[in-house]
């Protein structure tokens, strides 16, 4: 399936039907490919039918120069399986492991595998990524099993997890954290889990389900209010568009960012966020930082008009708009004044008579 989405210059080197010398050229990292394309090609060639090609790809992946790795490992558009495969191999190399852990496209399960045997420095990077910790329980489990980590680091992770509603009865450090945070008495009611909410409102697990009836919507809102942060994040990942619409308005930024980073998020939802003048700064930052979403012209236009978008970012998008839209912005009173002023200047400059016309 990944082969179908490849650029032609990559596909010709990795296609199973391509000549062996062509595939071997890429497996030896000799093909003229951009850094991210190079990593994708090597990843695919480790499953090649030819054993020599496979071995060469694995060997090349282990010896890639810093110039290639430092560029590619930060690329959020690189395929998650590629990022996960490289994290499995680079987990003990702090600099590269940190790049991969900070890349939101790196799969959570790969981060969990790295957490089991990474260094203290890399574990600190993992521990700071609160969204990952709450979204994927196994990351906390594996950190707790890592023999090289200090008690203070693990205690901090577990205390945060407990306060956010994460319940891992199979992890002794989490049980100890519950006593530290809540005392020996029974902890407060954790509220419903994401799975319980989806079981109660079956439609929420179906992306094609019609909107809930009004009565159900009211009770759902009340049920969601009682959920812990950890379970809201899981619902943001598992639920449908209606569930995401509730959670996107949540006051906790981890929850709203979990929604915008959900693998199920649709282009329509992204456009709605770009248009939303009350959207949280962190959510908008994810939108205008995503190159794939910025390929949608209406998203770029909406971000230009949104007063919550920082002016330098909005002006960058303004320069890419059609003249008709720039003209409309000069008359739109709801547009930030800085954007409106720059739009006027752009039009004046475009319509100013040239020297030839003046003479």
Image (cartoon, rainbow, N blue to C red):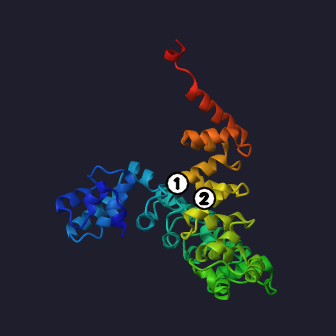
Q: Position of residue 74 (x, y in %)?
A: 48, 55
Displayed quadrant of residue 56 = bottom left
Q: Which residue bears the numbered disc 2?
A: 271
Displayed quadrant of residue 336 = top right
Where 343 falls versus 334 (above or below)? above
Neighbourhood count class around disc 1 (C-alpha, 10 Å): few under 14, some 14–19, many 20 upward:
few
Q: Which residue bears the numbered disc 1?
A: 296
Q: In this view, does 84 lie to the left or right of 318?
A: left
Q: Position of residue 69 (x, y in %)?
A: 41, 54
Q: Where is residue 157 in the image (x, y as percent from the top left)?
A: 66, 70
Q: In this view, does 228 lie to the left or right of 21?
A: right
Front-lying residue, 330 or 83 = 330
Please name the residue shown 57% across and 53% down the image. 298
Q: Do the residues labelled 1 and 2 touch (CB within 8 Å)?
A: yes
SS label for mark 1: loop
Please name the residue shown 29% across and 54% down the image. 9
């Amino acid at each position: 399936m990944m082969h179908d989405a490849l650029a032609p210059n990559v596909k010709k080197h990795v296609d199973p039907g391509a000549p062996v010398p062509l595939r071997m050229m890429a497996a030896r990292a000799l093909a003229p490919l951009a850094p991210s394309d190079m990593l994708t090609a090597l990843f695919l060639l480790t499953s090649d039918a030819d054993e020599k090609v496979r071995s060469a790809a694995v060997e090349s992946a282990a010896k890639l120069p810093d110039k290639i790795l430092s560029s590619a490992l930060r690329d959020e558009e690189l395929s998650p399986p590629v990022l996960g495969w490289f994290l499995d191999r680079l987990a003990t190399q702090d600099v590269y492991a940190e790049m991969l852990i900070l890349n939101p496209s790196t799969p959570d399960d790969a981060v969990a595998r790295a957490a089991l045997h990474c260094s203290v420095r890399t574990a600190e990077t993992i521990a700071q990524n609160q969204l990952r910790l709450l979204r994927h329980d196994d990351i906390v489990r594996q950190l707790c099993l890592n023999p090289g980590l200090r008690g203070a680091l693990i205690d901090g992770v577990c205390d945060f997890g407990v306060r956010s509603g994460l319940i891992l009865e199979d992890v002794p450090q989490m049980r100890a954290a519950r006593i530290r945070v809540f005392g020996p008495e029974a902890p407060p009611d954790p509220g419903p889990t994401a799975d319980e909410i989806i079981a109660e409102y079956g439609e929420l697990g179906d992306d094609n389900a019609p909107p809930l009836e009004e009565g159900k919507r009211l009770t759902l809102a009340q049920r969601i209010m009682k959920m812990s942060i950890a379970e809201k994040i899981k619902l943001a990942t598992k639920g449908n568009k209606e569930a995401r619409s509730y959670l996107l308005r949540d006051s906790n930024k981890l929850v709203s960012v979990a929604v915008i980073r959900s693998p199920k998020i649709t282009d329509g939802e992204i456009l709605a966020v770009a248009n939303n003048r009350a959207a949280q700064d962190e959510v908008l930052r994810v939108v205008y930082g995503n190159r794939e979403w910025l390929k949608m012209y209406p998203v770029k236009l909406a971000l230009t008009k949104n007063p919550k978008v920082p002016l330098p970012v909005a002006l960058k998008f303004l320069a890419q708009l059609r003249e008709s839209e720039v003209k409309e912005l000069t008359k739109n009173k709801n547009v930030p004044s800085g954007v409106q002023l720059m739009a006027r200047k752009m039009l004046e400059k475009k319509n100013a008579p040239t020297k030839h016309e003046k003479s």
